[in-house]
Image (tube, rainbow, N blue to C red):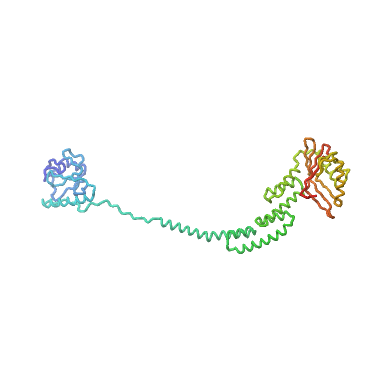
């Protein structure tokens, strides 16, 4: 056995494995129990395995040489092999290539085996298997979820189309038919036919539509000559989309205007304008209604005494005119009249003479004038004259029958003595007597 410590190279006793310092270090740092100096000798067949990491190349244990005495310092990669010739050490460089490590380990093991065969000593155990490489289990490739997503989307789209073509359309058609039957109108059945052509109830809808059309035609033939506004309004309410609706509205407009003209008051013209604004009809006579409303609306504060005097003049003049009482007419006329209906300025006497001539020419036609004294409207001018508007109804006998023509508005101007200095009228329509 060598008289030098195989770890640090210092002298040791023959019976000890290591020098005294190395023995203490092994016991304290690695907690390994070694035989006391001189207390026995390890048989040559046994090899002491020191704690440490096994070298991947040689298979021998590598001892960490930190904190060793300065005389016995070793490099990190210094490998100590037991029973090699004294002072013979070799250092293997580090190589990161594992293949090269394996080749070097195999070559080193073969050389050691030959050396031990020559000396006759037993070689220590050496790993014969190649160093295991890092092994990472191959991950199984997961099948993508994309095909399943696409398949699900396609199934949902197909289900939607099936629902839309069968259940939804069936529900809409049934609802449309129930609505048409409930309304029982031309518009309702037309809506059903247009929304569901070739539907389950298409033939029934066409038959009901034809029946309603025939009924509308017969109703129109009856109503186009009627004077009842309520019947026309009921028809429009029941058949708002009828082809006869525009004709019905025009007829309703005409009758409403005739009613306002017959009443011939500010209130009646106001009602007509309100119906036009509500959209009940177009209002062919709206501008005339507004003009007449302005004539008869009393905006000037009323003086009762003045109003009574105005009413007395109007009533006396038209009573005398209806009775062809020239002396009575003369009483209510001023000495000079600036306008007498269609004539210009004339004296009172001249006007009376023209009335006599006109009465003789219209023999056989008796005229009566009925002013609406309750609807008299007046305004007092700065010269103290009174401008008066009065609704008037004319009644005359023609060919043995009595006819009434409402809708006249007489315009008078009275002096402070309440005598007529001007008179003319607005006719209800062109060509009125």
Q: Residue 386: x percent and y percent?
A: 79, 38
Write down the quadrant of residue 65 in the picture: top left
Side of 166 relative to 360 (left or right): left
Write down the quadrant of residue 38 in the picture: top left
Q: Please tell me whether residue 35 is drawn above or below residue 166 in the rendered image.
A: above
Q: Residue 49: x percent and y percent?
A: 18, 48
Residue farthest to the right, as pictured: 327
Total numbered labels placed on residues in the image: 0
Residue farthest to the top, as pictured: 383
Write down the quadrant of residue 331 in the picture: top right
Q: Please tell me whether residue 216 is drawn above or below residue 86 in the rendered image.
A: below
Relative depth, front residue between 206 and 127: 206
Side of 43 relative to 376 (left or right): left
Relative depth, front residue between 167 and 299: 299
Relative depth, front residue between 29 and 217: 217
Q: Residue 102: x percent and y percent?
A: 21, 51
Side of 400 relative to 32 (left or right): right
Is residue 424 visible to us here?
yes
Relative depth, front residue between 293 and 166: 293
Is residue 308 visible to us here?
no
Q: Residue 67: x percent and y percent?
A: 20, 39
Residue at 36% x, 55% y: name it. Answer: 142
Q: Please tell me whether residue 279 is drawn above or below residue 345 in the rendered image.
A: below
């Amino acid at each position: 056995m060598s008289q030098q410590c195989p770890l640090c190279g210092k002298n040791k006793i023959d019976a000890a494995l290591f020098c005294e310092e190395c023995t203490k270090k092994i016991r304290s740092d690695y907690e390994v129990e070694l035989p006391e100096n001189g207390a026995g000798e390890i048989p040559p067949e046994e090899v002491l395995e020191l704690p440490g990491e096994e070298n991947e190349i040689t298979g021998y244990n590598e001892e960490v040489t930190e904190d060793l005495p300065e005389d016995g310092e070793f490099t990190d990669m210094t490998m100590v092999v037991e029973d090699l010739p004294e002072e013979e050490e070799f250092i293997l460089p580090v190589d990161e290539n594992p293949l090269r490590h394996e080749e070097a380990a195999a070559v080193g093991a073969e050389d050691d085996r030959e050396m031990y065969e020559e000396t006759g000593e037993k070689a220590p155990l050496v790993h014969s298997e190649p160093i295991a490489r890092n092994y990472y289990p191959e991950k199984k490739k997961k099948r993508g979820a994309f095909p399943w997503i696409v398949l699900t989307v396609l199934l949902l789209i197909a289900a939607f189309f099936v629902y839309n073509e069968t259940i939804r359309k069936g529900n809409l058609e049934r609802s449309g038919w129930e609505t048409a039957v409930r309304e029982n109108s031309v518009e309702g059945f037309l809506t059903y036919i247009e929304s569901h052509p070739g539907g389950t109830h298409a033939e029934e809808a066409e038959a009901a539509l034809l029946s309603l059309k025939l009924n509308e035609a017969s109703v129109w033939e009856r109503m186009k000559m009627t004077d009842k506004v309520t019947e026309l309004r009921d028809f429009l309410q029941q058949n708002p989309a009828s082809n006869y609706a525009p004709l019905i509205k025009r007829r309703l407009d005409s009758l409403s205007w005739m009613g306002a003209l017959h009443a011939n008051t500010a209130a009646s013209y106001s009602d007509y304008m309100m119906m036009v604004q509500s959209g009940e009809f177009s209002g062919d006579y709206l501008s005339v209604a507004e003009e007449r409303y302005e004539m008869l609306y009393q905006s000037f504060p009323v003086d009762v005494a003045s109003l009574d005097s105005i009413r007395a003049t109007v009533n006396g003049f038209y009573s005398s005119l209806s009775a062809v009482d020239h002396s009575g007419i003369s009483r209510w006329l001023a000495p000079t009249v600036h306008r007498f209906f269609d004539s210009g300025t004339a004296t009172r006497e001249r006007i009376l003479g023209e009335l006599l001539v006109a009465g003789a020419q219209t023999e056989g036609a008796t005229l009566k004038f009925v002013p609406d004294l309750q609807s008299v409207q007046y305004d007092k001018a700065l010269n103290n004259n009174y401008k008066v508007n009065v609704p008037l109804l004319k009644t005359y006998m023609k060919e043995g029958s009595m006819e009434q023509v409402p809708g006249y508005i007489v315009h008078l101007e009275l002096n402070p003595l309440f005598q007529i200095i001007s008179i003319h009228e607005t006719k209800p329509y062109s060509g009125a007597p």
